[in-house]
Image (cartoon, rainbow, N blue to C red):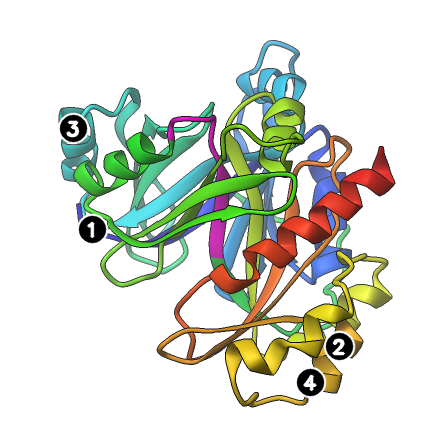
Amino acid sequence: MNLKAIDHLEFYVEDARKAAHFYSSTFGFRVLGESGPETGVVGRRSFLLQLGTMRMVVTEALTAHDSAAEYVARHGEGVKDIALLTQNVEEAFEEAVRGGARPVSEPTVLMGEVSRLFRATVAAPMGDSLHTFVQSEGRESVFMPPLFREAQGFTTPDVAPFVGLDHLAICLAPGTLAKTSRFYQEVFGFTETHEENVRSEYSGMNSKVVQNANGRIVFPMMEPAPDCKRRSQIEEFLEFHGGAGVQHLALLSGDIAASIRALRTRNVNFLDIPGTYYDVLEERVGKLEVEKSLLREFGILADRDASGLLLQIFTRSMHSRRTLFFEVVQRLNARGFGGGNIRALYEAKERDQARSA
């Protein structure tokens, strides 16, 4: 399929303008464009946002029977479409359908002022999610007039210390992890790069990571471990979200401390990490390239793989259903996803669950 990157994410939301203001003022997204009845789009309104190399579209339904309204009613606001950039939409679509993906919309071409946009959509192998294949010819940005016009009523936020999207984490129903991983490998040509099975005192999860050949499309996927004493955060997500879907977005930072400072000034709260985590940190990861006092001050987790050090921190969910949340990542050459920190995240999330109960 020659899938090259995540072209954009599309969120279905209750109020697109309100969501655009939130992501702009909180995370520093620039609001580039808007579409709706004024641009010939029937029944929907959308805003196009960008943060570093990451593009995101937030879409609301203008009629009660639109699929975006149905999605929000069932799942709450969340990621509906993970759009993938490819060199040939028709070939990618045909290969996906031949491999067992359910077709949603046939290949089409949209004509812009200076370019053409090819699109086709299949159902993703989890929940109500979609994958739209995207191919553009002409101007680099596929979101050109007349699809979008310049957005009005937004101020350009301060430059946020984010590079773009690092990965998307997906929660799956029990017993579906292996099947979903096989789908991405056999149909999309991805590789399974990591596997981690974790148990805490009360709960646990099984996880696998799949990614494309160049490593720009990365999906850590998780399912609840069986026979746990308590309901895990994966099970809680599945219940509150109404099935499988994107649990969190990991934003890549060049300076994680600066990113945390910026987000704290915008009223973003992070999960608490026990102080004892840092007492044995160097025994687990070896000599640190950063000051341990800085990690302790900001509640940053650290993990090491064969390539380098990974720094990460997780926000508390700001979602009305306590489902979607964000991760901030800084990679000091590391390629992993903090497998050594999964237990610490589980314990932190369990404290957060208890506090919210």
Report crowding for label 2: few under 14, some 14 to 19, many 20 or more residues within 10 A (C-alpha): some
Marking on residue 54: none
Classify mark 4: helix, strand or loop. helix
Q: Nearer the viewer, mark 2 or mark 3?
A: 2
Q: Is residue 31 among the parts visible in the rendering?
A: no
Q: Are marks 2 and 4 in contact (CB under 8 Å)?
A: yes
| Three-letter residue code for mark 1 | Gln
Where does label 2 land, which residue? 296
**Residue under the image location 57 percent in, 88 percent down:** 288
The residue under label 3 is: 99
In the picture, the disc for residue 292 is 4
Q: Name above or below for residue 99 compared with residue 342.
A: above
The nearer-to-camera label among 3 and 4 is 4
The residue that disc 1 covers is 87
Q: What range of the chain is rendered magenta?
A: 167-176
Crowd around label 3: few <14 · some 14–19 · many ≥20 (10 Å)? few
Q: Alpha carbon of mark 3 to alpha carbon of mark 1: how far? A: 19 Å
Type of amino acid under label 4: Lys
User: Of callouts 3 and 1, which one flags the residue occurring earlier in the amino acid sequence?
Assistant: 1
Q: Secondary structure at mark 1?
A: loop
Say if 50 sits above or below 299 in the image.
Answer: above
Which of labels 4 and 1 is toward the front?
A: 4
